[in-house]
Every structure is written in C-alpha cells, then in structure tokens.
Image: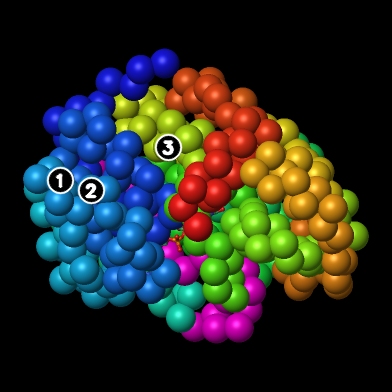
Amino acid sequence: MEIQLSNQKVLVTGGAGFIGSNLCEALLEKNNTVVCLDNFATGRKENLAAIVNNPNFTLITGDIRNLQDCLLATKGVDFVLHQAALGSVPRSIKDPITSNEVNVSGFLNMLVASRDNKVKRFVFAASSSTYGDSESLPKVEDVIGKPLSPYAVTKYVNELYADVFSKTYGLETIGLRYFNVFGRKQDPNGAYAAVIPKFVSQLMNLEAPTVNGDGNYSRDFTYIDNVIQANLLSLVADKTAVNTIYNVAYGDRNTLNDLLGYLKEFLAEFNPKIKDIEVIYGPNRLGDIPHSHASVDKAKELLKYDPQFSLQKGLKEAVEWYWKNL
Ligand code: NAD
C-alpha cells in the first residue's frame, strides 16, 4: 500500500529518539520537509546520522517544556507528529515530577503552539499503559481501567487534553496508543531500556537475560514499520477519522518466553552459542500488567491500517539490524 503524502512540512517532536527518528526518515523518503525538535534527554545524535545533512531536514535543539521552543518549531508547519516524552514506567515511578513536566506540561505547550500556528493536524504518541488495570482482552479503545503508574497518568491526560483542544479550538488531533514498539535504532542501554533491545544486546554478549516474573506475561509487540504506517495514515486520513484515539499494534500477543525463544533462534544464526544461554527469572515489576493484546479493528476500519509485520517477521529484521549496528 502506497501512502500518498509528499511536499508537506512535518514537525516530529522527539525526532532524535527511537520512533521519532524512524518517522523523520520515512517522511523524508516521501519528499516531505521535516523539522525535528528534541532536547536529547534520551534521543541520540547517531539516530539522525543518515538525515542530518539532508537539505529538507532541520534540527531544532530545544525543550517542549519551553513554549517559545514549541512556537518556533511549529511555525509554518502543516502537521505535527508529537513523540517527545519521557518513556518508561519505572522512570516515572522514580521521578514522577519530571515525567509530568515533560509529558503533561510539554504536551500542553505543543497543543497551544500547534493551535496558535494553525497546524492542520496534531498526531501524538499515546500509550497502551492507558488500559491500566483493565483486565479485558483484547483491548478496545473505549474500555480502559485505572492507570498503574505516573507514566500512564501522563499519557491518559494527553488524550484528555487533545480531546478538549479538538472540541474547544477545532484543532484536529489523533492519538495513537502504541503497544510495546520495537525495531531498528531502539536504545539497548541504560536503566530504562525496553525489553527487546536489552535482551538482544545481552544475548549478543552471551549474557543471561533476566525476565521480570515467570515469563508468562504477554504483550502485543509491535514492529516499528507498523507504527510508521499508522502515523503516515493518520496524516492523510479524512476528517471522519480525526479527534479520536487508535490502538497501534499487530493485534496478537506473545509471552516473554515466546519472545526469548524467537530471539535465541534468530540470533543463533549469527552465533550458535546463543541457543544455549539460560534465562534468569526475577520478581515481577511494579506497575506491569500481566497481559496486553490490542484490537486493531478501529484503526483498520477508519485509518485503513494494515500492519505488515508480525512479531517474528519484525524480530528477524530487528535482530539483523542489531547484529550489524551494535
Ligand atoms: P525515545 O526515548 O527513544 O524518544 C523520545 C524522544 O523525546 C527522545 O529523543 C528524547 O530526547 C525526546 N524528549 C524527551 N524529553 C524532551 C523534552 N523535554 N523536549 C524535547 N524532546 C524531548 O522513546 P520512543 O520509544 O521513541 O517513544 C516515543 C513516544 O512514543 C513517547 O511519547 C513514548 O511515550 C511513546 N510510546 C512508546 C512506546 C514504545 O514501546 N517505545 C510505547 C507506547 C508509547
């Protein structure tokens, strides 16, 4: 499916991060002009290495907590893909104030700046953490529980603010609730690294990965190219699809033990010793829900979302990338 989106000026906040930098590349490939606003809190210069000299790319080093930075970055922009935030549930448990300042106050600044600079559509990274303690599966957009972490509160507040800005100021918004995204350029290092790159890097170094819990928790692991597709579709979708929230996932669930099995199998093609690495099991982590599995019916119907990468297909690509790049 070819998405018709070219000659637009798009601001990607958090564009030096994992998802943001992949979005910048995808937009440039389609002959759009891209502005990236990032303060490099968790983003990395090397994520931008392939595009930093592209004449259609502008990097603004700035902070979404600063309204002036947001106003500068949204000037003359057609669309915003707002990705900047402090991710990670444990980070928000350790430091809820900073998570709130970036994820809530920064988000509000971006909405105000987008409104004032007459941005045509504001698409933002929401999160599956908004399902909180709801046990219903698969997750459908309208059935949410209570948040289980400060991070989840911030992401839910984003949805509420976006809704109010749509109704009050007529700003078109779309929130994409991402489910455990993985793929090229996701950072394997640091205390708050996501599970897939962390496991990949440990296995590549012949270290035993540690699982929180017994490995039977399950997730709807979502390959980055599915997420890129959902973002681009959100920019071209007609007006009947706006001012709402969509799950962005593959629409399946796999346990952490399944995940480790695939990782060992795929990485063993590069180093057969990896197959024999034992996994260590530790305690469950605070704020983690046991199972997560998205219904992607709404995105399929209204955005024409058609995810092409299952967990296994995405992992094969990701593992190959990490083997070449780590
Ligand atoms: P990331 O940490 O790689 O990217 C976030 C980017 O935002 C970084 O480049 C960081 O430097 C930037 N940033 C942070 N604070 C900022 C500030 N004050 N001003 C400007 N820039 C700032 O994380 P990611 O995985 O690419 O996540 C992108 C978005 O998707 C986030 O909003 C995150 O909450 C959301 N999300 C991610 C996942 C996932 O599985 N990765 C799941 C659900 C939601």
Density class for disc 1 (Cα within 10 Å; few <14, some 14-19, many ≥20) is: few
Q: What element does badge 2 sit on?
A: loop
Report x, y in % for residue 315.
62, 40
Helix, strand or loop under label 3: helix
Q: Position of residue 248 (x, y in %)?
A: 55, 38
Gap between marks 3 and 2, in whole Å? 17 Å
Instruction: Give the magenta part as a residue range.
Output: 78-97
Residue found 59% across the figure and 75% down from its top: 191
Tell me the residue that label 1 is attached to: 54
Nearest the eye: 263 or 88: 263
Instruction: Determine which quarter of the picture holds residue 233.
Output: top left
Q: In this rendering, is residue 244 above or below 165? A: above
Instruction: Return the disc, 3 or 2, that comes first in the chain's sequence.
Output: 2
Vertical comparison of 120 with 229: above or below: below
Q: Where residue 51 is drawn, which disc sits there?
A: 2
Q: Is residue 159 magenta?
A: no
Kind of residue at disc 2: Ile
How far from the left and from the top, in percent, is residue 126?
50, 52
